Structures are given as C-alpha cells and as structure tokens.
Image (tube, grey):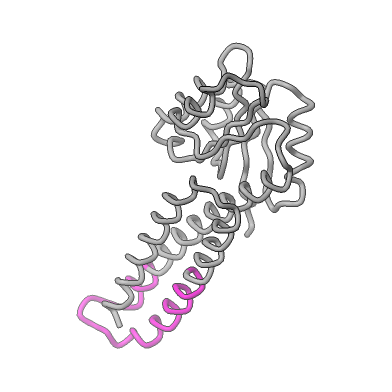
Amino acid sequence: MADRAKILLVDDREENLIALEAILSSLDLTPVRARSGEEALKALLGTEFALILLDVRMPGMDGFETAAHIKRRERTRNIPIIFLTVVDSAPDYAFRGYAAGAVDYLTKPFDPWVLRAKVSVFVELYNMNKRLTEQASLLRERLAGELPPGNSAAQPAVLPELSRRLTAVEDELERVRELARKSSDPGLTSPLTDLADRLDHLRAGFDALS
C-alpha cells in the first residue's frame, strides 16, 4: 500500500514513546508522537489514524478526558483506542477505560509481542476497510461508465474483474479473522462484524448483477 497506516502514540514521557516506537518498528506502519492530550487532539484534526495508543496518567488532560474528546468528534469517534497504564493504577481504571470507549486496556510493563499482535490486527482491519471502500468506489465508477442504462452488453467485461476483487477481499477478511482468533481480543468483534457486513452487501450487489 502506498500510504502506510498511522498510529498515534500519546504519552507525556519521552522514554515511553521511544519504547513504543521500538516495539512497533517491525510493523508496516507510521508512528506519530503526541506528548499530551491537547497535542493528540491537534494531531487528529488533520491526520487519519488507524489506532491510538493512549497513556492514562498524564498531567493536565489525562487519557480518559482525551478519549472523551476523541469520541465526541464525528471524524474521530470510530478510531480504536488502546489504553496503557502502570500495573498499580486504581482498580477501576480498566472499567473507566472501557466506559470511555477503549477497545482494550494494557498495563505496563506489557508483553511487546502481545502489543505488536494487537496493533497488527487493528492495522490490518484499517487497511482492509480502506481497500474495501476504494474497491467499491472504483467498481461503481467502472460499472457506471461501462454499463449504460438499459444496456448489459458490457457486463461480461466487468463482472470477472468485480468477482476477482471481491474474492481477494473475502480472503483478506478470513486472514484477519484468524489473526483476531490468535490474539483473543474481544475488542475486534464489532469491527470485524461491520467489515463482514459491508463485504456481504457488496457481494449481494455483485450477485444481483450476474
């Protein structure tokens, strides 16, 4: 993919940001740093992110308040958030994190492999959603251009391509489902279901044409 998915890393401590970047360095993504909640909200104004890794304990605007602002914005409310905090945090932090809209909650020090696995699945979901949106738009344009109203003569030239693209996306979806099963992440249930529904809708349109 030409544009790599961007991940927003939010932590007030430089050493934590450096550690996160090192853990995620093997993945095909672009990390973007933010040293505060306010800085994170500014970054979200002009950049599209696949995922946000958000520290809970920050001076000024903490992680919960930052997440509340993110979820109130139409443009950013659907970006997955994984909260990060130290192991001795208040016992209600996990509950507050999920209530604030987080898809997951990890305590420091966390297993680098677990973090990479979770981030990898969310990046795959993000990339698949982008590809599915692009393919649906492209195919609509192709069908509109090659299939004039009342004329189905061009269908044989278009439908094989449409079938190939749909099959490729369906194969990708199954691969991501397998990654989700391996990560045992309950936060992936909803986005996977939404993606499968979109794909089913597109497949139904193809079946109607053919």
In magenta segment, residue 142 = yes
Classify residue 148 as left or right of residue 197: left
Classify residue 57 as left or right of residue 24: left
Residue 172 place in picture, x, y as percent: 53, 67
Query: From the viewer's perspective, is residue 144 above or below residue 16?
Result: below
Which residue does the image show at 50% across and 20% down from the upper left? 65
Which residues lie in the magenta part? 140-169
Image quadrant for the N terminus?
bottom right
Query: From the viewer's perspective, is residue 118 above or below residue 84?
Result: below
Residue 17 place in picture, x, y as percent: 74, 31
Q: Using the image as rendered, state which of residue 160 and residue 108 is in the foreground.
A: 108
In magenta segment, residue 180 = no
Classify residue 157 as left or right of residue 205: right
Query: From the viewer's perspective, is residue 41 above or below residue 207?
Result: above
In the rendered image, which quarter is residue 110 located in?
A: top right
Which residue does the image show at 75% across and 28% down from the upper left? 16
Query: From the viewer's perspective, is residue 135 above or below residue 32?
Result: below
Which residue does the image show at 48% across and 28% down from the upper left? 95
In the rendered image, which quarter is residue 82 located in?
A: top right
Which residue does the image show at 40% across and 85% down from the upper left? 157
Residue 35 place in picture, x, y as percent: 67, 23
Image quadrant for the C terminus?
bottom left
Residue 114 place in picture, x, y as percent: 67, 46
